[in-house]
């Protein structure tokens, strides 16, 4: 079938039958693999000359000297109703130089994450989930810390709570009342047991205070670690382990 060419011919090429077969058999041109697209969460923010922040002291039995954690914040939208503080950098200082390398690496990585922006609260859970193979320790207040990294994460969490980035879930009134009732019942049972022990044998002995003694955190000295809130406030009541801090009970 003849085909009329209306345009001016500028060049030509003779196609042989074997060329058509080779073109059909040739594999399709491989596509380039897709490149990772870097998404910038916000514009680059230069470090101001002055930052506001807080310094926390960590005294761990794993270290001879205390750690001082300083977290500096950048103030966004200063002087407006939308003013807010966000962590910008973190420094950890101590006289103990045994762990200098990993502490510097940790602070640099955390500062980079802070400056990247977005939701940086995930750092808290990641750090608090780090366990020391040598075992953890109890900090002041009866709270168990599985490692020094976990306590640094706890400090970051406290700072984020102070600036309003993390909010504690409010305990409802029924749970508060349940904890108060459990605590009152435990103290009454302990006081009764103490009075029965000190009552009869020695009549001339001075009457002792039947009120149960509490530890520094305000919980009975024999309390064990609660698996839910990591506080040394778990006591045995009516054959069931009950936490006097968060209300957790193994019996439901």
Image (cartoon, rainbow, N blue to C red):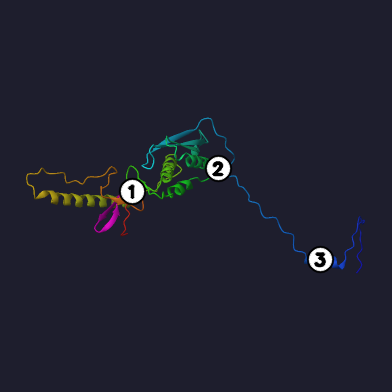
**Structural distance between the alpha carbons of marks 1 and 2:** 34 Å
The foreground one among 194 and 60 is 60
Q: Are marks 1 and 3 in contact (CB under 8 Å)?
A: no
Point out residue 230 in the picture as x, y percentages from the top left corner: 35, 49
Q: Residue under circle 3?
A: 22
Q: Outermost residue toward the bottom?
A: 1
**What is the secondary structure assignment of the residue under circle 1?**
loop
The numbered mark, 1 or 2, whose residue comes first in the sequence reads 2
The numbered mark, 1 or 3, whose residue comes first in the sequence reads 3
**Residue 188 against residue 107 in the figure, above or below:** below
Point out residue 36 in the picture as x, y percentages from the top left corner: 63, 51
Which picture quadrant has residue 13?
A: bottom right
Residue segment shown in magenta: 231-243
The disc placed on residue 231 is: 1
Q: Which residue is pictured at 83% across the width and 66% down the height?
A: 20
The foreground one among 218 and 66 is 66
Q: Nearer the viewer, mark 3 or mark 2?
A: 3
Q: Residue under circle 2?
A: 116
**Structural distance between the alpha carbons of marks 1 and 3:** 76 Å
Q: Outermost residue toward the front?
A: 98
Residue 238 highlighted magenta (yes or no): yes
Local crowd size for mark 2, using a 10 Å CA cut-off: few (<14), some (14–19), many (≥20): some
């Amino acid at each position: 079938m003849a085909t009329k060419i209306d345009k001016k011919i500028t060049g030509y090429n003779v196609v042989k039958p074997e060329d058509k077969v080779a073109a059909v058999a040739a594999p399709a041109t491989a596509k380039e693999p897709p490149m990772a697209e870097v998404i910038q969460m916000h514009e680059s923010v230069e470090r101001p000359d002055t930052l506001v922040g807080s310094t926390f002291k960590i005294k761990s039995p794993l270290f001879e000297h205390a750690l001082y954690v300083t977290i500096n914040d950048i103030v966004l939208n200063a002087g407006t109703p939308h003013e807010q503080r966000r962590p910008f950098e973190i420094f950890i200082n101590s006289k103990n130089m045994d762990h200098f390398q990993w502490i510097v690496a940790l602070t640099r990585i955390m500062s980079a994450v802070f400056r990247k922006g977005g939701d940086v609260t995930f750092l808290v859970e990641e750090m608090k989930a780090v366990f020391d193979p040598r075992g953890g320790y109890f900090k002041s207040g009866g709270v168990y810390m599985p490692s020094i990294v976990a306590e640094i994460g706890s400090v970051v969490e406290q700072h984020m709570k102070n600036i309003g980035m993390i909010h504690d879930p409010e305990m409802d009134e029924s749970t508060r009342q349940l904890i108060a009732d459990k605590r009152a019942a435990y103290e009454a049972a302990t006081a009764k047991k103490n009075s029965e022990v000190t009552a009869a044998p020695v009549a001339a002995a001075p009457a002792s205070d039947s009120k149960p003694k509490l530890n520094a955190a305000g919980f009975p000295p024999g309390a064990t670690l609660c698996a839910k809130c990591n506080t040394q406030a778990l006591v045995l009541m009516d054959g069931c382990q009950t936490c006097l801090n968060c209300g957790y009970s193994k019996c439901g």
